[in-house]
């Protein structure tokens, strides 16, 4: 077996841009990026297996209102892409869906990445063979402000896993939106903080299987929508099984006029256990068995 090849990127390296590093990289390579600010730099990944990681600190990719392919800073369209220890910021595109990472195919693994001030933090497509895994990451102030773009927006992929991450202050859109067949959301902080304008904190609009465990979920007083967790809001025809499992979460409302802690669509099943719900004038809205 050949040794894993390291491709180095940095202001003092022979390769100074991620775009050039990806052009030279082969399947199985690791791209290591020195901590610095990289302006208007990004890349499309089509390799079958590639890792990119920041070293010697956290590199910051500032799109400065630009994008790759009119889509994002990083466009993932290969096999397995691992992204570690970066900051991805300020992506804007003509259709108002510019993403820190635009995920179109394959398995995406994100660890210790900050997504800040993009039109979407991550935006994925609709490929049931694809998957997204996120851990130890932050999604801060993403969204165009139109309600159609979000801190995290995962399409109809096979599986989404989000663990130990922080979501806050989405611009009008949701803190986390997933259309995945299976969405596992565990041990995160999803809190819009004072003056936040996010809509739902968690939106699973197509149903599927939602496993929401051990999270702190908090709605601000200035939210754009009174519902905190929504399941099946856009219909249940996409997936054969539609069940929400909500356990060991703390769910807090600061909206003075009240809230709906959990809203589920008729035809789904909701299983709630050992959750703490806190806040004035709130209710549950179960459309199916609870």
Image (cartoon, grey):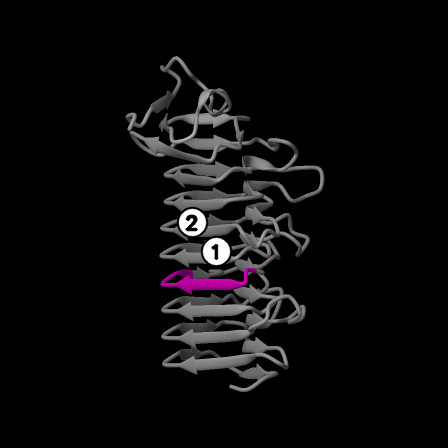
Q: Do the residues bearing badges 2 and 1 touch, measured as CB atoms within 8 Å?
A: yes
Residue 241 lies in what quarter of the image? bottom right
Disc 2 versus disc 1: distance between alpha carbons? Answer: 8 Å
At x 60%, y 67%, the residue is 239
Closer to the camera: disc 2 or disc 1?
2
The residue singled out by tag 2 in the image is 138
At x 31%, y 28%, the residue is 4
At x 41%, y 37%, the residue is 86
Residue 93: percent from the left, percent from the top?
A: 66, 37
> Is residue 196 visible in this depiction of the protein?
no
Q: Is residue 9 positioned above or below 93 on the image?
A: above
Residue 229: percent from the left, percent from the top?
A: 53, 71
> Is residue 182 visible in this depiction of the protein?
yes
68 displayed left or right of 252: right
Please tell me whether mark 2 sits on a helix, a strand or a loop.
strand
Q: Which mark is residue 256?
A: none
Please tell me whether mark 1 sits on a helix, a strand or a loop.
strand
Among all residues in the image, which is located at the extreme front? 1
Query: Is 181 part of what is drawn in magenta?
Result: yes
* Crowd class of label 1 (few under 14; some 14 to 19; many from 20; radius 10 Å): many
132 displayed left or right of 149: left
Compare residues 51 and 89 and report the one nearer the observer: 51
Q: Which residues are magenta?
A: 180-189
* Quarter occupied by the N terminus: top left
How many numbered dots are placed on residues in this image?
Answer: 2
Among all residues in the image, which is located at the extreme right? 95
The residue singled out by tag 1 in the image is 168
Residue 8: percent from the left, percent from the top?
A: 36, 21
- Report the predominant secondary structure element of the magenta stretch: strand
Of label 2 and label 1, which has the lower sequence position? 2
Q: Is residue 95 positioned above or below 47 on the image?
A: below
């Amino acid at each position: 077996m050949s040794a894993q090849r390291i491709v180095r990127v940095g202001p003092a390296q022979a390769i100074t841009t991620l775009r050039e590093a990806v052009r030279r990289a082969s399947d199985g390579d690791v791209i290591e990026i020195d901590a610095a600010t990289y302006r208007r730099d990004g890349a499309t990944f089509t390799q079958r297996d590639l890792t990119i990681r920041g070293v010697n600190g956290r590199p910051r990719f500032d799109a400065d209102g630009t994008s790759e392919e009119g889509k994002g800073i990083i466009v993932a369209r290969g096999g397995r892409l691992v992204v570690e220890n970066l900051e991805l910021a300020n992506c804007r595109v003509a259709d108002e869906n510019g993403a820190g990472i635009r995920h179109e195919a394959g398995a995406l693994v994100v660890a210790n990445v900050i997504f800040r001030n993009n039109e979407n933090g991550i935006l994925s497509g609709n490929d049931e063979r694809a998957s997204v895994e996120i851990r130890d990451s932050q999604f801060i102030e993403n969204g165009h402000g139109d309600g159609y773009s979000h801190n995290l927006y995962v399409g109809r992929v096979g599986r989404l896993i989000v663990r130990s991450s922080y979501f806050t202050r989405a611009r009008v859109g949701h803190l986390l939106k997933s259309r995945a067949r299976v969405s596992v959301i565990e041990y995160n902080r999803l809190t819009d903080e004072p003056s936040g304008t996010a809509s739902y904190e968690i939106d699973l609009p197509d149903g599927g299987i939602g496993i929401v465990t051990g999270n702190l979920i908090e709605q601000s007083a200035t939210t754009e929508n009174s519902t905190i967790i929504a399941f099946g809001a856009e219909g249940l025809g996409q997936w054969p099984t539609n069940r929400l499992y909500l356990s060991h979460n703390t769910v807090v409302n600061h909206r003075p006029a009240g809230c709906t802690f959990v809203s589920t669509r008729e035809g789904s099943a909701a299983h709630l256990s050992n959750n703490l719900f806190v806040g004035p004038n709130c209710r549950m809205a179960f459309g199916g068995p609870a």
